[in-house]
Image: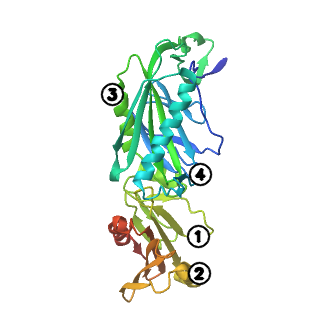
Amino acid sequence: MKKLIIIVLILLIGVQLFAQESKIMRYSTRLDSTTFLFIDNSDRNWFTIEIKTDTLVQIQNDLFYAANKTIQIISTQFGIQLVNGEYVNIVGNQNAEKRILRAHKKWELDYQKKGFGRLKNKGEFFYGKENKPFSIWWIENPKNWEGGTTSFGTTIQYEEIDLDTEDPSQFIHTQESWKCTHQVWLDFMIHGKTCVSISIPVLDTENLQTEFEKLKQIALSLNVYGNYIDPKGLFERIDNPNYIFKDSLNLIEFEIPKWLNITLNTTKVKDMICGTFPEKDNITNAAVILWRAKSDSLAFFKSKNHFLGNVDKGSLTVIRKEENKEQYFFTRENGWFHCQVVYIEGENAYCMITFTATESTYQYNLKRFYDLIDKIKVK
């Protein structure tokens, strides 16, 4: 019996691609029948968003097919910029953040005007979690623009056809075309160094305000990590939202709080979990949980001494000191970082939990840190 494997690619007409050359690590997973989780684990990106669609297919690095049309997701990274002769500090500075978003809109709009001339456009700022600013704006495509028609073919991936009983032509559908009346952009900053721009066309069968609201829902789903995302930890928590971590030697266990984003352990230190707190003002506080069996106490105290090596002189303050638990506050980098470290001794293991924040975000995440400590059981 003869079989044929057919792969039909999506055809795009009249859509220009603006991609940057960089090492891109992007993937997605289905959350339910109507939602995909988009994961960008590229350098200095490290974020996830939720996209309402029953299909999400990557066409090229920055271009995807979702909800029956294209969606483009571009990350632009930049260094320190000068404004009026002074350096702009985006981190913790919402006014500077909004200036960058306005500048990005102007850059994109100027680029579009080169091809189309004058363009009717309008935009606004809106605010998401923790008053985070997002820029959303649109242009109206010229009515006589010949490239204003976008065509899509039906996606069929690895469909097995029995040539003895089935006609392959029935699996290849005629392309459908829609007029693109507008293009909408959603722009936002992460880490104070990366501007993410999400763009979708508005078809003549769609309502502009409705497409605005769809992009706003994507914005509200934004989750920013402070370092490379740990895919294993992410997928385990998707499968089990109340995921309880247990190490292989049964030395510690704890339910991972829903707000804690597990990041890759990029060090050579074993038996350690790294995580970051919810973003605020382009800042992501960090927590590290390290444990050792008492038989490996030398390695534990070596790690303890190494961590305290950069403490600002005179800043170390005792918060709590009990027989099996010690807790300290201190600053680093001339007061820029506000930190805590907690040592817990169990019957069979030692555990060290660290919390690193900035002066402006320390109080914001302190309650979450205490919640994390309370969940950890050292055996």
- Please tell me whether mark 3 sits on a helix, a strand or a loop: helix
The earlier-in-sequence mark between 4 and 3 is 4
- What residue sits 36% from the left and 56% below the top? 242
**In the image, residue 57 lies at what x, y percent?**
53, 31
The residue beneath circle 1 is 270
- Please tell me whether mark 2 sits on a helix, a strand or a loop: helix
When the figure is inspected, residue 337 is found, relative to residue 35, above or below; the finding is below
Q: Nearer the viewer, residue 149 or 105?
A: 105
The residue beneath circle 3 is 209
Q: What is the quadrant of residue 266 in the picture?
A: bottom right
Would residue 64 be seen by someone viewing this image from the given angle?
Answer: no
- Distance from the alpha carbon under mark 4 to that under mark 3: 33 Å
- What residue sits 57% from the left and 20% below the top? 12
Mark 3 surroundings: few (<14), some (14-19) or many (≥20) residues within 10 A? few
Mark 1 surroundings: few (<14), some (14-19) or many (≥20) residues within 10 A? few
Q: Nearer the viewer, residue 265 or 227?
A: 227
- Distance from the alpha carbon under mark 4 to that under mark 1: 23 Å
* Disc nearest the viewer among 4 and 2: 4
Mark 2 surroundings: few (<14), some (14-19) or many (≥20) residues within 10 A? some
Q: Amino acid at mark 4?
A: Asp
Q: Amino acid at mark 1?
A: Lys
Q: Which label number is shown at residue 299?
A: 2
- Distance from the alpha carbon under mark 1 to that under mark 2: 10 Å
Q: Which label number is shown at residue 43?
A: 4
From this viewpoint, which residue is outermost toward the bottom? Answer: 323
- Distance from the alpha carbon under mark 4 to that under mark 2: 31 Å
- Please tell me whether mark 4 sits on a helix, a strand or a loop: loop
- Distance from the alpha carbon under mark 1 to that under mark 3: 51 Å
The earlier-in-sequence mark between 2 and 3 is 3
- What residue sits 49% from the left and 76% below the top? 332
Could you tell whether 104 is left or right of 121 in the image?
Answer: right
